[in-house]
């Protein structure tokens, strides 16, 4: 089970780390999109959410201060899901479906993060720091 948990942790962490990379690599483009969605100070918001993704992803991957890392990712998912993927506000059916898929994916990720909190500390095959 320790190996399965490690592989699952790696998969989830890499998802968040790739997202962080995308935030920083495409800061200008993502800032424009966030601005179009009505996010105030979009460049700072994209950089800030990139930092949440980076720190939270590293925390999951390494097992370092995981409760804090999970908290950062929960903050990210709650903020982004309801502001950027508010599908219920979109009239166009194709755009609505796309945003609904992203919203529901984020809610499923939120559920997986909450389940990480039930794993006894320290996590198997982790650095075990900050439990």
Image (spheres, helix red, strand yellow):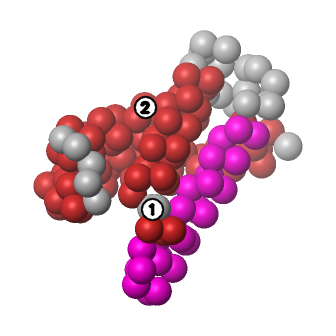
Crowding at label 2, few (<14), some or many (≥20) Cα neighbours within 10 Å?
A: many
Quadrant in the rendering for residue 131: top right
**Can you say whether 83 is above or below 95 in the image?**
above
Q: Is residue 110 magenta?
A: yes
Furthest toward the top, the residue is 130
Q: Is residue 66 magenta?
A: no
Quadrant in the rendering for residue 128: top right
Q: Which residues are magenta?
A: 90-115
**Can you say whether 125 is above or below 36 in the image?**
above
Element assignment for label 2: helix
Q: Main secondary structure of the magenta part?
A: helix
Q: Position of residue 72 (x, y in %)?
A: 49, 31
On screen, residue 63 versus residue 88, left or right, reads right
Element assignment for label 1: loop
Mark number displayed over residue 3 = none
Q: Position of residue 46 (x, y in %)?
A: 27, 45
Q: Position of residue 33 (x, y in %)?
A: 23, 62
| Residue at 48% in and 68% down | 87
| Residue at 66% in and 41% down | 113
On screen, residue 93 versus residue 113, left or right, reads left
Quadrant of the snapshot with the N terminus: top right
Query: Disc 2 marks which residue?
Result: 55
Mark number displayed over residue 85 = 1
């Amino acid at each position: 089970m320790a190996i399965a948990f490690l592989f699952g942790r790696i998969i989830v962490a890499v998802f968040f780390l790739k997202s962080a990379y995308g935030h920083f690599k495409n800061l200008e483009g993502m800032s424009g999109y966030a601005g179009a969605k009505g996010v105030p100070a979009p460049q700072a918001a994209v950089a800030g959410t990139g930092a949440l993704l980076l720190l939270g992803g590293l925390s999951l991957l390494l097992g370092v201060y995981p409760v804090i890392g999970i908290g950062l990712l929960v903050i990210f998912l709650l903020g982004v899901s309801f502001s950027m993927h508010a599908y219920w506000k979109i009239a166009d059916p194709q755009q609505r479906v796309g945003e609904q898929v992203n919203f529901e994916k984020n809610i499923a990720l939120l559920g997986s993060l909450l389940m990480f909190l039930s794993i006894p500390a320290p996590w198997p095959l982790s650095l075990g720091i900050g439990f």
